[in-house]
Image: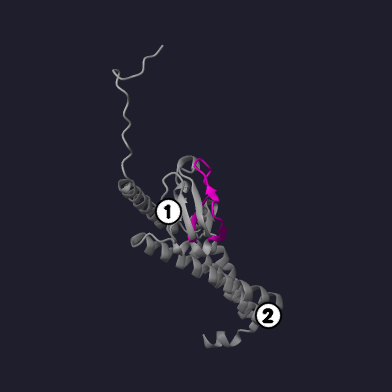
Amino acid sequence: MRDFLSTLTLSDLATGFNALAAALVILGYFMKGMIRLRVMAATSNVFNFLTSVLTLSPIGLIEYGISTPINLIRMREMIRLVDRVKLASSSDLSMDWLKPFMRHRHARAGEVIFARGDTADRMYMVGTGRFRLIETGIEIPSGQVVGELGLLTDGNRRTQGFECVEAGELFEISYHHVRELYYQNPEFGFYFLGLTSRRLLANIARLEAELERRPPAPAIVEPSSATAAPVG
């Protein structure tokens, strides 16, 4: 074994590292989960980087010196995403873990974010300001998500409108992006559906409590036939 190692040249090592990198790329084609795919890609990048060092390839050093940390960062993001949604699905109903994947936008007072019957294509998280559901008048507090159920319903139509009462900030993410996260890691989808179901039940309970607090509508007294005004 020592004799074999002593006969290895830098060129032989470079060829070996390159072969390992190629094998990992091929193996990555069979990976279904995004986390596993990122692991394979990052490991392959490391071997390709070592090959570039041994062969003194400046293009390889730049390419794999950049792609390796990117793959590691993306892998870490996906692992943290799955961990956070798993924790949320078993504890509170917060969706703060989704915020890094959402786009920030400003809303002005009186602006209708979406109306009842509109096509639902994204969901929102309240940051600052005051927002409410138009038909029921229920306010959505900071940190709460609205519009997520349109992702799961037939026709993807809004069942209520949503408006800004006092100017503030919203975070939004398209259903397309949520589906991408699901397809990249089905485990995310599993916990997301569980969390969404719990939020649906919580929203129903909150709506029922809000309706119970409201005073009953005054009874409408119809005139009796004896006092009704004559016709004709």
Q: What residue is shown with label 2?
A: 55
On the rendered image, what quadrant is the C terminus found in?
A: top left
Question: Where residue 134 appears, x then y in whole percent?
Answer: 46, 46
Q: Which residue is mark 1?
A: 139
Amino acid found under the numbered disc labelled 1? Glu
Question: Could one spot residue 121 in this view of the protein?
Answer: no
- Marks 1 and 2, the one that precedes in the sequence: 2
At horizontal 32% and vertical 26% (from top left) the residue drawn is 222
Q: At which x and y percent is residue 223?
A: 32, 23
Relative to 115, residue 90 above or below: below
Residue 84 in sight in this render: yes
In this picture, which residue range is highlighted in magenta?
A: 102-128
Q: Is residue 15 left or right of residue 171?
A: right
Say which residue appears at 40% left-offset and 57% top-offset.
191
Q: Residues within 10 Å of mark 2 (few under 14, many from 20)?
A: some
Nearer to us: label 1 or label 2: 1
Taking depth in this image into account, of 97 and 230 the one nearest to the observer is 230
Cα–Cα gap, marks 1 and 2:
63 Å
Find residue 211 and report its horizontal and vertical position in percent.
33, 46
Q: Residue at x 53, y 57 (%)?
A: 172
Query: Can you tell which mark lies on residue 59?
Result: none
Number of residues whose C-alpha sits closer than 10 Å to that of mark 1, classed few (under 14), some (14–19) or many (20 or more): some
Provide the secondary structure element on which disc 2 rests: helix
Res 56 → quadrant: bottom right
Q: Is residue 196 magenta?
A: no
